[in-house]
Image (cartoon, rainbow, N blue to C red):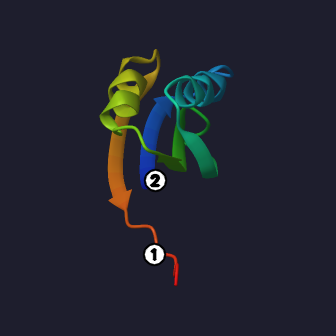
C-alpha cells in the first residue's frame, strides 16, 4: 500500500468537501487523516488529507483537479514504515 498526502485548495461551497470525499472513495483510496480550514474570511478552503491505496495517485489527483470549485491539488508520496515479518 502506498500512502500520500494531498493538499487541496478550493472555493468555499457547502458541497465541496462531500465531492472530494466521494471522489476519493470512488477511486479506491482510503482516507487516513483529514484536516480542513477556511481562508480569506470563509471564501476559500484548504483541505489536507492523508490517503492510502495500491492504485496510482494520478487516478485520484487528476479527477480532483476536475471537480468544480477545486483550484489546486498537490501530492506528496509518503513512505510507510516496514513491518517485521520474521
Vertical relation: 49 (above or below) 69: below
Q: Residue at (34%, 47%) from the top-left corner?
A: 75
Q: Which percent across, then down, holds residue 67?
A: 44, 18
Q: Which percent across, then down, holds residue 8?
A: 44, 40
Q: Which percent across, then down, holds residue 71?
A: 37, 29
Determine the image quadrant of residue 56.
Answer: top left
Within 10 Å of disc 2 (Cα), the crowding (few <14, some 14-19, many 20+) is few
Q: Which percent across, then down, holds residue 21?
A: 61, 30
**Which residue is more in the foreground, 76 or 53?**
53
Q: Which residue is mark 1?
A: 82
Q: Say left or right for 49 vs 57.
A: right
Q: Residue at (59%, 29%) from the top-left corner?
A: 25
Q: Earlier in the sequence, mark 1 or mark 2?
A: 2
Q: CA distance from mark 1 to mark 2?
A: 11 Å
Q: Residue at (45%, 67%) from the top-left corner?
A: 80
What numbered label is drawn on residue 9? none
**Which residue is more in the foreground, 9 or 5?**
5
Q: Residue at (36%, 33%) from the top-left corner?
A: 61
Q: Which residue is mark 2?
A: 1
Residue 40 shows in this picture: no
Determine the image quadrant of residue 63.
Answer: top left
Amino acid at each position: 500500500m502506498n500512502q500520500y498526502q494531498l493538499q487541496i485548495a478550493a472555493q468555499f461551497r457547502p458541497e465541496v468537501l462531500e465531492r472530494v470525499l466521494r471522489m476519493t472513495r470512488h477511486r479506491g483510496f482510503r482516507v487516513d487523516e483529514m484536516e480542513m480550514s477556511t481562508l480569506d474570511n470563509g471564501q476559500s478552503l484548504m483541505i489536507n488529507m492523508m490517503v492510502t491505496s495500491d492504485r496510482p495517485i494520478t487516478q485520484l489527483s487528476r479527477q480532483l483537479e476536475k471537480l468544480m470549485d477545486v483550484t489546486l491539488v498537490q501530492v506528496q508520496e509518503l513512505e510507510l514504515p516496514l513491518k517485521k515479518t520474521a
